[in-house]
Amino acid sequence: MAEEITCEKCSGECCKDVSIYYREPKRFDDFEIMKWLIAHKDVCVYVDHKGVWAVEVKTPCKFLGQDSKCMIYPKRYTLCRDYSASECLMSECPGEYYSRIFRTEEDVDIYMKEIGFYEEYLKEKARRENPAGKGPSTHELIAEKKEEAVQAVQPVIEFSQ
Ligand code: SF4
Ligand code: SF4
């Protein structure tokens, strides 16, 4: 059995990043945003052991001391105060807080292939990258409708002449 990790033995791992919940990606835009997020330095997306998706930014808190202790401990934030080692991901699964992690575009592509969304993603990507594939703009649609109206009244005008 792995040795239990306690805050005393830990080097303040929970103070070295910011994790924000991210809804499970299912649509084209979700995956595009995910790729854009992880294109940034020290940003990744992961799924924890409970299946919760999160965006992680590796950046330490300004109040984490050289000794890995909080420098404002008595006045630390409510979020920090409410976070207990019993729910800490380090304690639940020491050394590996994620069941899946996305660090590169390839990681995202592999996932999309697994869930059977990759072909649809590529099609939508091509459609958006090709302005001609976007379909007519609102102005073009209005012009088209005007042309249809002109063609509809044309025989009437010709007949009455
Ligand atoms: S809550 Fe978890 S990650 Fe934070 S210091 Fe304690 S054991 Fe380490
Ligand atoms: S305020 Fe203290 S406990 Fe909270 S994240 Fe910063 S170093 Fe950690």
Image (cartoon, rainbow, N blue to C red):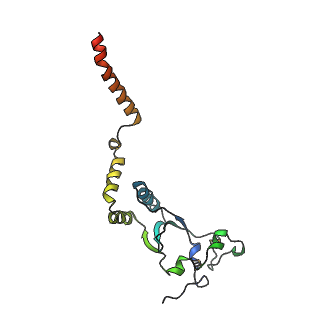
Residue 74's quadrant in the figure? Answer: bottom right
Residue 7's quadrant in the figure? Answer: bottom right
Residue lying at the far top of the rendered structure: 161
**Where 44 sits versus 86, above or below?**
above
**Where 145 sits versus 135, above or below?**
above
| Image spot of residue 135 (x, y percent) | 34, 40
**Where 118 sits versus 6, above or below?**
above
Compare residues 106 and 138 and report the one nearer the observer: 138
Q: In which quarter of the image is ligand 2?
A: bottom right
Which residue is pictured at 52% across the width and 88% down the height? 3
| Image spot of residue 94 (x, y percent) | 50, 81
Which residue is pictured at 42% across the width and 54% down the height? 29
Compare residues 20 and 66 and report the one nearer the observer: 20
Which residue is pictured at 43% across the width and 57% down the height? 30
| Image spot of residue 17 (x, y percent) | 55, 70
| Image spot of residue 32 (x, y percent) | 42, 56
Compare residues 73 and 67 and report the one nearer the observer: 73
Q: Quadrant of the C terminus?
A: top left
Left or right: residue 22 compared with residue 141: right
Which residue is pictured at 53% across the width and 76% down the height? 89
Residue lying at the far right of the rendered structure: 74
